[in-house]
Image (cartoon, rainbow, N blue to C red):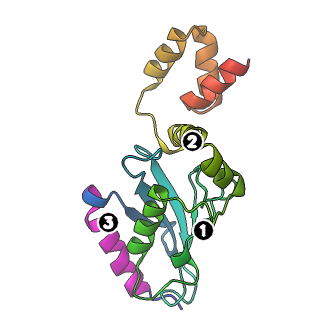
Amino acid sequence: MVDLARVQKELQECNRDVEVSGIRVSPKADSLTNLVGTIPGPLGTPYEGGTFKIDITLPDGYPFEPPKMRFATKVWHPNISSQSGAICLDILKDQWSPALTLKTALLSVQALLSAPEPDDPQDAVVAQQYIREQNTFVNTARYWTEAFAKTSSLGVEEKVQKLVEMGFPEDIVRSTLEAVGGDENLALEKLCSA
């Protein structure tokens, strides 16, 4: 059975210095075994400026068994599945220790974003690109960060204005933005392919 007192203590630890670490963990639907972690993309990486959500499920054996973590935010990285968000990281498997916490696990995942291990990939396609075409990898990772890990703070009118300045008719811009729930990246894709 999950040690709920420990989990509550760990949640407090994770959320104590959010301003410094940027790491946050909160329960999903008032369950202490289904959590959502948030980590900022590390500075100086293609993930910089992004905020990545990670689904965390605590098994019955926690803390003696590792938490199950996967990226809910799409990310382009050799050790993270671009399809499922599965993470290839030793401390989430056989190197887990009960002395580790959710925060240390999330810090390790964040460190993985800074230091990919293409020789032990979760996503072989991304790993090959990382090894053979470093520039293409960096540009793709940066694009995915822009598209999936950044929430635009622009209001609707600013988004409309920006897309109209690119030469799209305002009425089509408005209906396209509405159709994609205000996501300007998706709207731009749709407008370009129309």
Amino acid at the residue labelled 3: Asn
Q: Which circle marks residue 15 in the picture?
A: 3
Residue identified by numbered label 2? 144
Q: Quadrant of the N terminus?
A: bottom right
Whether residue 82 appears in this view of the structure is no
Mark sitting earlier along the chain (1/3) = 3
Residue 5 lies in the magenta stretch: yes
Which residue is painted at 36% across and 48% down in the image? 43
Q: Nearer the viewer, mark 2 or mark 1?
A: 1
Whether residue 169 appears in this view of the structure is yes
Check whether the beta carbons of the residues at disc 2 and disc 1 lie within 8 A of each other.
no
Measure how far apart labels 2 and 1 are at the Cα level: 19 Å
Measure how far apart labels 1 and 3 are at the Cα level: 25 Å
The foreground one among 157 and 64 is 64
Amino acid at the residue labelled 1: Cys
Image: magenta residue range: 4-19
Q: Position of residue 130 (x, y in %)?
A: 60, 50
Residue 145 lies in the magenta stretch: no
Measure how far apart labels 3 and 2 are at the Cα level: 27 Å
Q: Position of residue 61 (x, y in %)?
A: 55, 90
